[in-house]
Image (tube, helix red, strand yellow):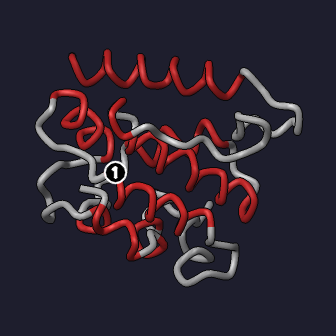
Amino acid sequence: MKQMIFALFLCFFLCSCLNEGTDTGDPGLTNGGQPIQADPSTGNAVETIVVNFCKLMKTCEAVDPGSCQMQLLNQSNIDTELGLGANDYPTLNDISMALDNGAINVNATGLSQCLSAIDGLDCNSPGVPAAYDAGAGNPYQGVAAAIPTACTSVF
């Protein structure tokens, strides 16, 4: 029940951020058209990584950013890519909840390097073309292979 409430809260939070809009008209951006950047002390590192990666997916695959974010938060194969042990947390949403609960902490330098590396990806970067498959049962199953190695020190 707590996970459902958290997921609804997270959805509301992300949707309200996306509906705010920007001067550029891109709903996946704020701050004058720059990618949303997390303050590691706020516990939003996972959400920020997801938002920035979904911005890339929107550019490369024309996916809906809100749908991308919700589906990525439910992905179960992204953990060691962020510096966690395999299967320590079932989903990115669980990692986010662990941050909120203080069970894990963000490495601010690692987060900054990860966000910069995601920003440096383009549609032809290794792993990115296979990160989204609209015809698959889990269209974002390939995202783990596209997460830059710089992200392994986020946690």
Q: Residue at x 60, y 24 (%)?
A: 15
Looking at the image, residue 57 sits to the left or right of residue 22; the answer is left
Quadrant of the rendering where the N terminus is positioned: top left
Horizontal and vertical percent for residue 87?
A: 14, 58
Q: Which residue is mark 1?
A: 108
Q: Residue furthest front?
A: 109
Q: Position of residue 154 (x, y in %)?
A: 31, 58
Location of the C terminus by quadrant is bottom left
- Residue 134, relative to residue 71: is it above or below? below
Residue 122 in percent (x, y) is at 68, 73
Observer-nearest residue: 47 or 109? 109
Q: Residue at x 57, y 64 (%)?
A: 132
Residue flagged by tag 1: what amino acid is it?
A: Ala
Q: Is residue 91 above or below residue 11?
A: below
50 over 128 or under it: above or below: above
Mark 1 lies on a secondary structure that is: helix
Q: Residues within 10 Å of mark 1 (few under 14, many from 20)?
A: some
Q: 81 left or right of 32?
A: left
Horizontal relation, residue 121 to residue 34: left or right = left
Residue drawn where x is 40% and y is 72% of the image: 150
Q: Could you tell whether 12 is left or right of 105 in the image?
A: right
Q: Position of residue 145 (x, y in %)?
A: 42, 75
Q: Is residue 88 visible?
A: yes
In this picture, is 111 found above or below 45? Answer: below
Image-quadrant location for residue 60? bottom right
Seen from the viewer's position, the closer of residues 72 and 56 is 56
For image coordinates 20% across by 49% down, the residue present is 90
The answer to whether residue 139 shows anywhere in this view is: no
